Amino acid sequence: MKPIISNSDYSTLKSLITNCPPHLKSREIGQLAEELDKAEIVDDKKVSDDIIKLNSQFEAEDIHTKKTWKFVLTLPSHANLKDQKISVFSPLGVALIGFKKGMTIQWALPGGLKKIKILDVVNH
């Protein structure tokens, strides 16, 4: 499965990754760079509303535990867990950006390999 990324998100994320100081580069940043390299990059107006992109509100579920999360995917500088905003550089953010409602993704998160189903996506 290839993530679908808008031109503007692609440019923003590539710039963030390129300009990230070496001492701050994490495994997730490397994984995000790999995901961007294999992504389908499309015109902003052609990205459907059910795809997770920057500033999307989404709900996802761990298939095994049935635990659900509701977050807004943000740039690292806007991330704030108490406001339910997670960074695109977080393990869950890297796993889900570019994928759409109804899809199930398998990804290594801090708690181990997880199967995550995207239950809902809202883009404003």
Image (cartoon, rainbow, N blue to C red):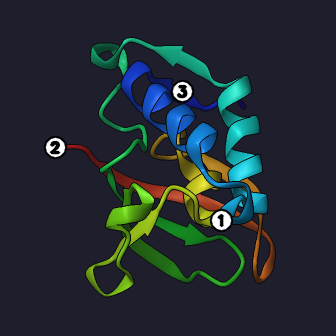
Per the rendering, the mark at residue 124 is 2
Q: Residues within 10 Å of mark 1 (few under 14, many from 20)?
A: some
Residue at (35, 78) in percent of width and height: 80
User: Where residue 70 sits: x, y (%)?
Assistant: 37, 72
Q: Which residue is mark 3?
A: 4
Per the rendering, the mark at residue 115 is none
* Apparent side of residue 109 relative to residue 59 in the rendered image (left or right): right
Numbered disc 2: secondary structure: loop
Whole-number angstrom distance, CA of label 3 to CA of label 1: 18 Å
* Apparent side of residue 111 relative to residue 69 in the rendered image (left or right): right
Residue at (52, 43) in percent of width and height: 16
User: Where residue 43 sits: x, y (%)?
Assistant: 38, 12
Whole-number angstrom distance, CA of label 2 to CA of label 1: 24 Å
Residue at (46, 26) in percent of width and height: 11
Which comes sooner in the sequence, label 2 or label 1? 1
Tell me the quarter of the picture where residue 124 sits.
top left
User: Where residue 71 sits: x, y (%)?
Assistant: 37, 68
Give the residue type at disc 1: Pro
Tell me the quarter of the picture where residue 14 sits.
top right
Give the residue type at disc 3: Ile
Between disc 2 and disc 1, the foreground one is: 1
Vertical comparison of 114 with 42: above or below: below
Which comes sooner in the sequence, label 2 or label 3? 3
Q: Residues within 10 Å of mark 3 (few under 14, many from 20)?
A: many
Which comes sooner in the sequence, label 3 or label 1? 3
Numbered disc 1: secondary structure: helix
User: Where residue 104 sits: x, y (%)?
Assistant: 64, 51
Q: Which residue is mark 1?
A: 91
Q: Give the camera-side residue of 22 and 38.
A: 22
Q: Quadrant of the N terminus?
A: top right
Give the residue type at disc 2: His
